[in-house]
Image (cartoon, grey):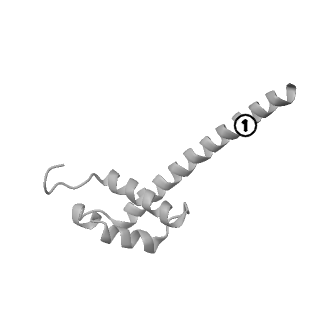
Amino acid sequence: MSPGAFPKLSDFVELAAAEYYLESGRVELDARWIAAYFQDSGVMEAYPRQDPVAFGELVQKALDTHAERAGKQMRLHLARIARVKGRLRRR
């Protein structure tokens, strides 16, 4: 990245979603947390026209997407366990 260049907005969104989940362990975004993040992380400086509410909605969407993927992976793992367990019972 060249000097003075800022990360893409999508990078800020993904970082915010990851940081929030790691800190809170929750998928529902807290308005105070995202407001502080928006101000402290440099989003305001990099994107002065970005609406904080819209940014929060993007972060919530990223959290929802990650939770959905995690749920799908969990169901796949449980299905694999059930198949293995079924094979072991037949022996």
Q: Please provide percent x and percent y for residue 59.
A: 43, 58
How packed mark 1 is, by other alpha carbons closer than 10 Å (few <14, some 14-19, many 20 or more), is: few
In which quarter of the view is residue 88 placed?
top right
Residue at figure coordinates x 38%, y 61% from the top left:
54
Residue bearing mark 1: 81
Residue at figure coordinates x 27%, y 65% from the top left:
42
Residue at figure coordinates x 55%, y 63% from the top left:
25
Question: Is 44 situated above or below 3?
Answer: below
Residue at figure coordinates x 23%, y 65% from the top left:
48
Question: Is 40 situated above or below 55?
Answer: below
Camera-nearest residue between 65 and 73? 73
Q: Please provide percent x and percent y for residue 35.
A: 38, 72
Residue most toward the top?
91
Q: Please provide percent x and percent y for residue 67.
A: 56, 51
Q: Which quadrant does the C terminus fall into?
A: top right
**Left or right: residue 67 compared with residue 10:** right
**Left or right: residue 28 compared with residue 51:** right
**Left or right: residue 60 compared with residue 85:** left
Question: Is 84 situated above or below 54?
Answer: above
Camera-nearest residue between 5 and 87? 87
Residue most toward the left?
3
**Left or right: residue 66 compared with residue 10:** right
Kindly state the secondary structure of the residue where label 1 is placed.
helix
**Amino acid type at image mark 1:** Ile
Camera-nearest residue between 3 and 60? 3
In which quarter of the view is residue 90 placed?
top right
